[in-house]
Image: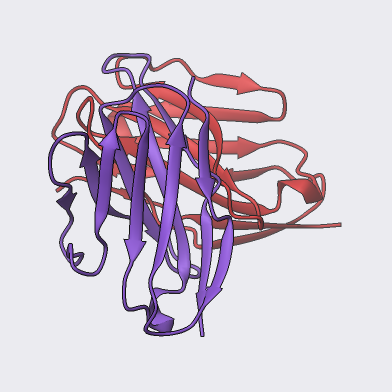
Chain colours: A purple, B red
Amino acid sequence: SAVISQKPSRDICQRGTSLTIQCQVDSQVTMMFWYRQQPGQSLTLIATANQGSEATYESGFVIDKFPISRPNLTFSTLTVSNMSPEDSSIYLCSVLYGLDRYTEAFFGQGTRLTVV
Amino acid sequence: AQKVTQAQTEISVVEKEDVTLDCVYETRDTTYYLFWYKQPPSGELVFLIRRNSFDEQNEISGRYSWNFQKSTSSFNFTITASQVVDSAVYFCALIFNAGNMLTFGGGTRLMVKP
């Protein structure tokens, strides 16, 4: 199994500022995933972060708005840049273990962001 | 198209009632993994179950049970004798290709009233 530590757990930010969310995993993983959950909505994948290469962004998400770092196999950050109230969401990081019948998906505790 | 559909956006029951949450998926892949997660008001995702596409055995865990039917592409979740603490949003999700990301359904908000 994997233990994921995500911080901050919540923050209230002023519009126009940026927030960096950190995700630390207790073991090495190849891929890390960042999701956004807008109020009352489901989870939407923002990007996949692989160590040693640039993150792969899903449609509707761009690197300038959501830059991601992946300096090693246990750590990643997601920055929400130039925030507006529409960015108020829960942001979650996730990892997968296994490529066979024992595939598991683990999530961080989430970062609840409010932009005012 | 590959997607997960949870047609019930919100369900309200009275405590001790049984309730079934529906999940229907679409995929062309023969190997995939199905998940159910619970999200209480605190926001974290709580893992409930994982089922592989080649294992159609249904599963029971206490008051929870899951019915996986490949013939109808469904993976339904039943809570027996519901309790107030079961109130949460429940998500069904899939990994369509080994090593790929999760695709989530829209979620079902379950409210259990005393």
Specify the farthest residue to the front.
A71
Specify the farthest residue to the right.
B114
Residue B24 placement (x, y as % from top left): 35, 44
Left-right relation of B114 to B106:
right
Left-right relation of A79 to B9:
left
State which quadrant residue A27 falls in: top left
Residue drawn where x is 55% and y is 55% of the image? A8
Residue B14 placement (x, y as % from top left): 79, 55
Left-right relation of B18 to B53:
right
Residue A59 placement (x, y as % from top left): 15, 61
* Up/down of A45 relative to A63, above or below: above
* Up/down of A100 relative to B9, above or below: above
Residue drawn where x is 71% and y is 36% of the image? B80
Residue drawn where x is 27% and y is 38% of the image? A71
- For the question of whether residue B103 can be seen, the reply is no
Left-right relation of A67 to A11:
left
Residue drawn where x is 24% and y is 42% of the image? A49
* Up/down of B1 relative to B95, above or below: below
Quadrant in which the C terminus of chain B appears: bottom right
* Up/down of A54 relative to B69, above or below: below
Counting every numbered tag in the picture gives 0
Observer-nearest residue: A9 or B37? Answer: A9
- For the question of whether residue B35 can be seen, the reply is yes
Observer-nearest residue: A101 or B26? Answer: A101
Observer-nearest residue: A1 or B50? Answer: A1
Residue A67 placement (x, y as % from top left): 24, 59
